[in-house]
Amino acid sequence: MKRQRKKKFSIKKTLRLVIPLLFIILGIVLFINKDNLHTYYLTKTTGYDELTITTIKDNNLNTAILNKKYSKTLESIINSEYFNSEYLDEYLDIEYHDKDNFLSNIDALLTLGYTSNDINLIYNKLNDTSINIIINNTYLKDLSTIINLSYFKEDNLERYLKYINSNDFDSETAIIYVNIGLDNDYYSNVSSIEDPDDILVLVNKYHKLSADYIPSDLETINSKYQWYGRSNQLRKDARLAFEEMCEAATKDNIYIYAGSGYRSYATQLTLYNNYVKRDGFAAAETYSARASYSEHQTGLAMDIANKTDFISEGDKEYEWLINNSYKYGFILRYPKDKEKITGYMYEEWHYRYVGIDTAKAVYDSGLTYDEFVAKS
Ligand SMILES: [Zn+2]
């Protein structure tokens, strides 16, 4: 009995010494490994791998990332030569793309001044060639705005940037002008028209018809709307609309006539050459189209006359046409003060048939047809 009591007492005493000792040892172990434990904790809570967490801690960025969403972009760039702690917030917002040069590209874009929003848009909308073009150009504040325009054409990106940087136009105007082709001289960078029969066909100094194009549905306009016995033709729909318009004008005591409608390639060639001989090359270029580049070859354009001459501003017929022609599908094709855009002097007499819906839309827009097409 005595011995047992003594033994029990002895175990209690030992435990009293050992337990605090164990706690002290545990404390020392935890203290020595606190860094590892912290890393373990961050790995679990943030989703980053251990290497990334170590780099984050080395850069004293733990608090900055602690309550943020995991970012694969940050995880990738932080362990690369492209990491710059200044851009931490941007890295967190840039969506990761598993593509070549992604890290060096986002570094280049951030260095140029683009934001994470810009970069996400660039990567979501543009191809690698475009991304390189952006990186090799100066920063453009409106880049995101431009990319989001419905008439932004990626193939034109390099031209947009060049044109914006060398002109004073606002970015949206610059995009329209480049879409028209105005960043190149007239008659340069020309494309051949693929569907010349389309009623909406755009013919200008950048879009040419083939020499042998002749519309298949040309019709001669009723003689009562012909100017002094001429025999002008238009394509069927345009012919009907033109006659309807003449008739409506008559009801308002306005008398308009077909002065010059369809012209073949050969006719246009002779006409242009004669103008050059008469007025010189530079002058002829402002009012006469080279063969293949004339709207008259489409059979959809009409130079309108009154009893004495082709229509000019100030004539009551001019006033009537400006206010009514769109109702019949015709638009004034070469308006005043738009010479640089259309490539032609103001032609008060030259109307183009595009159909009623488009004519109304062009009329409402206040744009030239070249701009209207460039925006669509
Ligand atoms: Zn004309």
Image (spheres, grey):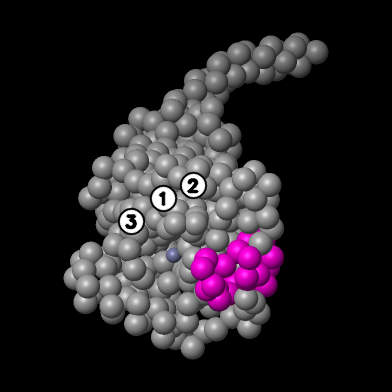
Seen in the picture, residue 129 relative to 248 is either above or below; the reply is below
Side of 32 where 42 appears, left or right: right
Kindly state the secondary structure of the residue where label 2 is placed: helix
**Neighbour class for label 3 at 10 Å: few (<14), some, many (≥20)?**
some
Answer yes or no: is residue 287 visible.
yes
Q: Residue 76, percent across and down? A: 43, 51
Q: Residue at x 76, y 16 (%)?
A: 4
Q: Residue 166, percent across and down? A: 23, 50
C-alpha gap between disc 2 and disc 1: 6 Å
* N-terminal-most mark, 2 or 3: 2
Seen in the picture, residue 163 relative to 10 is either above or below; the reply is below
Q: Residue at x 23, y 64 (%)?
A: 283
The image quadrant that residue 188 belongs to is: bottom left
Q: What span is colored magenta in the figure?
A: 221-242
Side of 354 where 137 appears, left or right: left
Seen in the picture, residue 20 relative to 144 is either above or below; the reply is above
Which corner quadrant of the figure contains ligand 1? bottom left
Residue type at numbered disc 1: Ser
Q: Specify the quadrant that holds the N terminus.
A: top right
Seen in the picture, residue 267 relative to 155 is either above or below; the reply is below
- Which residue is labeled 3 in the image? 345
Kindly state the secondary structure of the residue where label 1 is placed: loop
- Which residue is labeled 1 in the image? 312
Report the disc number at residue 318: 2
Q: Is label 3's Cβ within 8 Å of ligand 1?
A: no
Residue type at numbered disc 3: Met
Q: Residue most toward the right?
A: 1
Q: Which residue occupies the foreground of this view, 248 or 45?
A: 248
